[in-house]
Amino acid sequence: MIPITVLLAEDHLIVREGLRALLKTERDIEIIAEAGDGRRVLELTRQLRPDVVVMDIAMPLLNGIEATRQILHELPDTRILILSAHSDDAYVEQVMALGAKGYLIKQSAAHVLAESIRRVHQGKICLSPLISKRLRHHENKAKTRGDLHAKKDASHLSPREMEVLQLIAEGKANKETAAELHISVKTVEKHRQSLMDKLDIHDTASLTRHAIATGIIESSVQETTI
């Protein structure tokens, strides 16, 4: 039996250790790597080509939504299973639209995670029952109202602007952001101005609040500086 290879992407070490312990007992699942930030997730996925990436949303350097976008753009056969404390419909719809195969909330029972890994590996869609029920309710409600066209676009920022926004919200200066993204400071400044224009937000504190409100970073990252 060839095991399903899994990469665990979770920035909290104690949670990652717990997930590893849970999955270690499953004979058909093998954890081949772990990562604590989004950029490391990208590096390891490119290098190791895991069958399934179990992905948190709120991670440093690059959030799980943007990591999912980039992984599936480069490696479309990779299966992404989101495991997050955030269950907001906007997050669910955004990552599923990107091509993630599943979305679980962290309160899910242990056996649900292993079974979900198996299902997404087979190419099946897997959602926590609560999320599935809520999305069906919203869809039925929208059909009743006849306003399916009213669904909001998740983001009108480019992938690079999303990266710049996250690094700004995490307190990185333009020079640090440039070094992190391997671009010039002038390019960072252009991206910064562009995302400010698109969001109609014109100061760093408000950008940070926007990043927190939309789940790009966790509130604990920068909440004391706002």
Image (cartoon, grey):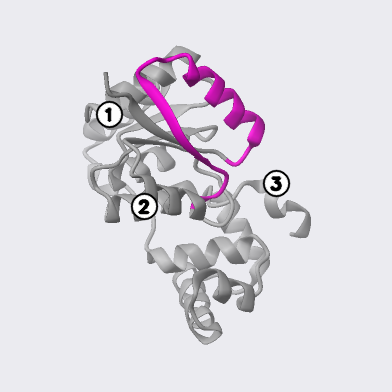
| Residue 140 found in image quarter | top left
The residue that disc 3 covers is 220
Residue 223 percent location from the top left of the image? 73, 52
In the rendered structure, which disc, 3 or 1, sits on the residue that comes first in sequence? 1
Q: Residue at x 56, y 47 (%)?
A: 59
Q: Which residues are magenta?
A: 11-38
Calculate the distance from the C-alpha at mark 3 to the C-alpha at mark 2: 30 Å
70 left or right, relative to 13:
left
Callout 2 amino acid: Arg
Label 3, label 1: how far apart the Cα atoms are:
33 Å
Residue 121 in view = yes
Note whether 63 is above or below 158 in the view shown: above
Q: Which residue is mark 2?
A: 46
Q: Nearest the camera: 39 or 135? A: 39
- Closest to the camera, between mark 3 and mark 2, is 2
Q: Looking at numbered disc 1 in the image, what kind of residue is underneath it? A: His
Classed neighbour count for the residue bearing mark 3: other residues with Cα under 10 Å, few (<14), some (14–19), many (≥20): few
Q: Is residue 12 magenta?
A: yes
- Circles 3 and 2, Cβ within 8 Å, touching? The answer is no
Mark 1, residue position: 121
